[in-house]
Amino acid sequence: MRLLLIEDETSLLDLIQRNLARAGFTVDAVDTADLARSALSTSRYDAVILDLGLPDEDGLVVLREMRSRRDTTPVLILTARDDVEDRVTGLNSGADDYLLKPFAIPELVARLKALLRRPSGALGVVLEAGNIRFDTAGREVTVDGKPLALTAREMTLLENLLRRSGRVIPKRHLEERVYGFDDDVTPNSLEVLLHRLRRKLAGGGFSGEIHTVRGVGYMLADNAA
């Protein structure tokens, strides 16, 4: 899933971005309210992590703007403001969760996954197609019950294909889900990644395959279905 991280403390931003990537998320990171607005206007996110003490504006302004235009993307506030009144204000402004600094990375990951498992969220816990099974919480892929070793980016690609199994997914959509805007992406980056994923799925005995729909995108299909 693709997240937007809005945090102005460089060391913390780098720490969060690195650990969320390890947990299987694609993360775009910005450090001001203006950059957050730009990112939100050009990309679709599954969740937003929002610091309130931004250098150019209070993060609550960004949150209220999102809700005023009916943007229902889950928002987790990450802040040092620990007064009850501050938490109530944040939640009343439209936040879905509130995590105080300092915090443990495993708790942040767990809270994000909990948000994304809600009915309006995007994260189903277990995805299956044919003989492949993907536990998105544990980040484990198995084929016929046997573990399949994939890189974090290969897992992200597979997850997006599984979520729309049997349907064609436009190439641009997959690129947006797999790569952040700071990633070094070439015109054939997705094709190279798909080639590696196909090879591993075939080697692991997957009963289906990833089809290329020329000029449109890609589709994961279970040939035994």
Image (spheres, rainbow, N blue to C red):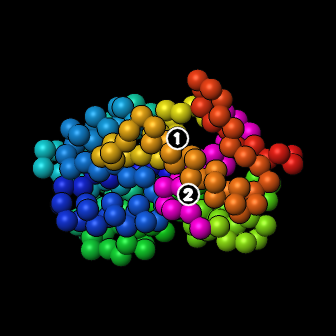
Name the residue located 40 percent from the left edge and 30 percent from the top edge: 69
The circle drawn on residue 116 is none
Residue 208 is at least partly visible in this image: yes
Relative to 205, is 139 on the left or the right? Answer: left
Q: Is residue 30 left or right of residue 140?
A: left
Q: Position of residue 139 (x, y in %)?
A: 57, 66
Please identify the quarter of the rendering in which residue 134 is found: bottom right
For disc 1, the marked residue is: 191
Mark 2 and mark 1: Cα distance apart in space: 15 Å
- Who comes first in sequence, dot 2 or dot 1? 2
- Tag 2, which secondary structure? helix
Location of residue 161 by image quarter: top right
Within the magenta stretch, is there residue 150? Answer: yes
Relative image position of residue 190 (x, y in whole percent): 49, 42
Expressed as whole percent of the image width and height from the top left, the position of residue 12 reads: 23, 65
Dominant secondary structure (helix, strand or loop) of the stretch shown in magenta? helix
